[in-house]
Amino acid sequence: MLDLYNNKYDRETLKKNIYAVKLIDILKTQIIDVSFAVRYLLNYKYQLHDGDNITTPLIIKYQPHIKYEDLQKALYNYDSDDDSIEDFETVSNLSLANVIFELKLKKN
């Protein structure tokens, strides 16, 4: 599991773990770009946890380097076919396998 509050992660790591963490935690702790905000944080299909109701004002609040105009432009030009994340079932099975592996390591 990612430790968002104590570490910074690159875009690819965040994307691979998008279902395993709260989006609000990514927003508050990581430095993201405009396309990541649009593709993942503002995308309802990734908002699975309580508190993951991310809005454009929240993006601007917690990511002050992102300008409102750039966010609006990215939203307007967003094409969902650009997303290249695995489906939820595949990702959750990978995450579950990692958790089981880590538990076995701790047990030994």
Image (cartoon, helix red, strand yellow):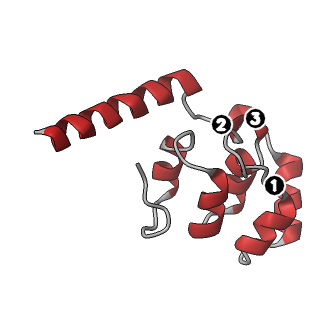
Q: Are marks 3 and 2 in contact (CB under 8 Å)?
A: yes
Q: Residue at x 57, y 34 (%)?
A: 85
Query: Up-down: is 22 above or below 102?
Result: below
Q: CA distance from mark 2 to mark 1?
A: 14 Å
Q: Residue at x 65, y 52 (%)?
A: 23
In terms of depth relative to the viewer, which is nearer, 76 or 46?
46
In terms of depth relative to the viewer, which is nearer, 81 or 13?
13
Query: Up-down: is 65 above or below 48?
Result: below
Does the image show residue 92? yes
Instruction: Determine which residue is flagged by label 3.
Output: 80
Residue flagged by tag 3: what amino acid is it? Answer: Ser
Q: Circle 2 sits in a helix, a strand or a loop, which is it?
A: loop
Q: Residue furthest left?
A: 108
Locate residue 108, reporting x and y percent.
Answer: 10, 39
Instruction: Determine which residue is flagged by label 1.
Output: 74
Q: Circle 3 sits in a helix, a strand or a loop, which is it?
A: helix
In terms of depth relative to the viewer, which is nearer, 12 or 28?
28
Circle 3 Cα neighbour tier, 10 Å, few/some/many (<14 / 14–19 / ≥20): few
Locate residue 14, reporting x and y percent.
Answer: 51, 51
Residue flagged by tag 1: what amino acid is it? Answer: Ala
